Amino acid sequence: MRQLIIISTILFIQSCETKSADNKKNTINNEDTLTEIAPKAASDAKGDKLTKLEYNCSYDNEVSSLGNGLIIAPAKFDLYNDSLLNNKYASWDMYEDETRINLCSKFFKPDYGIMHFVCIAKSDKAYKVIINASDTKYFPKTKSYDFKTWDEYILQSYGIRRLTANTGEISAILPLRIAPKDNADTLAIPQGYEMFCPMDIKGDWVKVKYDCFYNDENSLHEGEPCHDFIDQCKNPLTGWLRWRQENKLLIDIFLMP
């Protein structure tokens, strides 16, 4: 059993993939209040009647900004049009309203309880998040809505790999380097399926160790977080990967076995 990608910490999911399938703080200004109007198709005036899903969401969706982290939404959540939380956009239950959630989050898999939203600002009362690539809405700032920085999200994952194309091919423009610099020497990665354990982050770069067990047909560490076993790899290949380029994520993030 292989891991299912995430984004971009943390709420986790279980996958059925096989190997072959393989800080500058922002604040919300009051001028944001009530400036964003919900699409008519999203809900009625009470926000409790939802229409059929209109957006073509993938698991990892493009966003206009990667912000300062992610909001891990609870299974039942409320979104608002304004930072003072006076105008509700809609309420959803991921499991009951899966086919009627009329928006895309950065990481979207509601049937697995996954709706992770990029957070671009926060105040004492609310989180400002991105929906549908560039639109913005607000979550209440309560314990039910878990904020994770990108560093936390990546370092707490089960592992990462370089971004892959729809064909499954790994991008050749994302080499493993000996230092967190674009002009640093590159390292040759072993042949086969790749997985890395994230160890440290410096800016747009993540230090990784190669998972030497990932290609084993019957790995003794299948389903374990990589930090639990990576030290058992003898002299694992270690280097740096660029994990973001401006507002584009360059890695797949695995959140569950």
Image: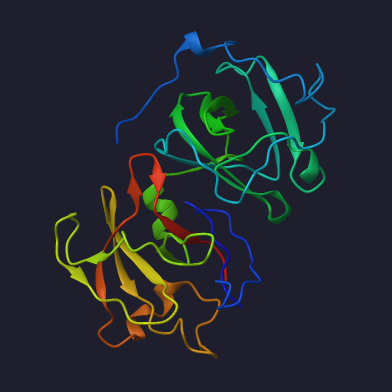
- Residue located 59% across and 59% down the image: 12
- Residue located 41% across and 35% down the image: 67
- Position of residue 7 relative to residue 197, above or below, is above
Viewer-side residue, 106 vs 156 = 106
Viewer-side residue, 150 vs 126 = 150
Q: Give the image location of residue 154, x and y in percent.
A: 41, 56
Residue farthest to the top, as pictured? 31
Which quadrant: the C terminus? bottom right
- Position of residue 146 relative to residue 123, above or below, is below
- Residue located 58% across and 39% down the image: 145
Q: Give the image location of residue 192, x and y in percent.
A: 42, 81
Viewer-side residue, 93 vs 3 = 3
- Position of residue 216 relative to residue 108, above or below, is below
Q: Give the image location of residue 5, x and y in percent.
A: 54, 60
Q: Quadrant of residue 232?
A: bottom left
- Residue located 49% across and 42% down the image: 70
- Position of residue 2 relative to residue 78, above or below, is below
Residue farthest to the front, as pictured? 167
Say left or right for 80 vs 196: right
